[in-house]
Image (cartoon, grey):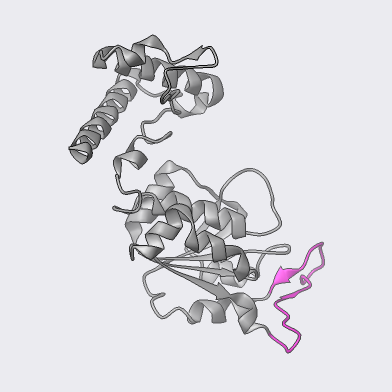
């Protein structure tokens, strides 16, 4: 995948490109990530990229010229999805992240100030995306969130794709509790069922815990859904992950 992120603060992405999941994806050649400085296309020598709104109103807007000209710097922009990070966009979820991973190249614009001139939104942007129902000062952190969620689905990025396939939301439920060694620590013990070696009992325990967490914290995820279908998907993905782990370990 080729990806570009357009921002007024390119320095914020320096560590992001070098560390963690994104760093491995870039270093292994699975993702080409370009960082574009919108201020390189400022409209004057002072570096201006924003101006007052026509018709009045609080907040400055990013002008159209730097935005369009930054987009035009991307030689592979034809066919790419052009994303604007904005509080008024579509809510990012598991389905959308996987769709973007499958769709090809991405160009992500980080808004600032009171937003961007709507001519850019209407004629250049293909997707307006929001990562949560809260407003932050700019789109840089939301853009990192989006890229991390998307890059996880590119084969080879995680090393074992089943790690993404069995994450929270992939099964349709929130995650179940997970434990590792030691089996007892400061008087806290790992649930006995996980040490039993009884695969059916473990599957049932994990499903019940995941379902309970979802009913308590995110009931919207399972409203009007068939519980048998949810359980079938859950078990299938868990078994798929276990088979892949055995293969990798072997």
Image quadrant containing the C terminus:
top left
- For the point 69% across and 50% down, the residue is 135
- In percent of width and height, residue 227 lies at 35, 19
- Compared across the picture, whether 18 is left or right of 130 comes to left
Please tell me how many numbered marks the rendered image carries: 0
Image quadrant containing the N terminus:
bottom left
- For the point 73% across and 80% down, the residue is 48
- For the point 53% across and 51% down, the residue is 145
Q: In the image, is residue 168 above or below residue 91?
A: above
Q: Give the extent of the magenta segment.
A: 43-62
- In percent of width and height, residue 100 lies at 39, 55
Q: In the image, is residue 174 above or below residue 83?
A: above
Which residue is nearer to you in this view: 248 or 158?
248
Residue 57, image quadrant: bottom right
Q: In the image, is residue 180 above or below residue 161?
A: above
- In percent of width and height, residue 219 lies at 51, 23
- Compared across the picture, whether 102 is left or right of 187 comes to left
Q: Is the magenta stretch mostly helix, strand or loop?
A: loop
Tell me if residue 204 can be seen: no
Which residue is nearer to you in this view: 168 or 124?
168
- In percent of width and height, residue 200 lies at 25, 14
Q: In the image, is residue 53 above or below residue 25?
A: below
- Is residue 51 shown in magenta? yes
């Amino acid at each position: 995948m080729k990806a570009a992120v357009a921002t007024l603060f390119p320095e914020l992405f320096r560590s992001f490109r070098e560390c963690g999941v994104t760093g491995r994806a870039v270093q292994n050649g699975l993702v080409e990530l370009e960082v574009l400085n919108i201020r390189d296309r400022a409209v004057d020598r002072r570096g201006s990229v924003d101006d007052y709104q026509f018709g009045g109103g609080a907040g400055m807007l990013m002008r159209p010229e730097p935005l369009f000209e930054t987009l035009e710097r991307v030689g592979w922009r034809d066919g790419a999805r052009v994303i604007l990070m904005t509080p008024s966009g579509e809510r990012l979820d598991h389905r959308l992240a996987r769709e973007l991973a499958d769709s090809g190249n991405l160009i992500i614009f980080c808004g600032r100030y009171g937003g961007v001139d709507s001519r850019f939104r209407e004629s250049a942007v293909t997707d307006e995306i929001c990562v949560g129902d809260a407003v932050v000062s700019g789109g840089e952190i939301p853009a990192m969130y989006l890229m991390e969620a998307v890059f996880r689905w590119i084969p080879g990025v995680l090393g074992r794709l089943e790690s993404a396939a069995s994450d929270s939301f992939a099964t349709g439920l929130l995650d179940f509790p997970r434990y590792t060694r030691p089996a007892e620590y400061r008087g806290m013990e790992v649930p006995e069922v996980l040490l039993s070696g009884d695969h059916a009992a473990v599957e049932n325990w994990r499903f019940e815990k995941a379902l309970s967490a979802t009913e308590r914290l995110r009931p919207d995820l399972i409203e009007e859904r068939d519980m048998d279908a949810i359980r079938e998907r859950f078990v299938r993905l868990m078994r798929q992950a276990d088979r892949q782990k055995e293969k990798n370990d072997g």
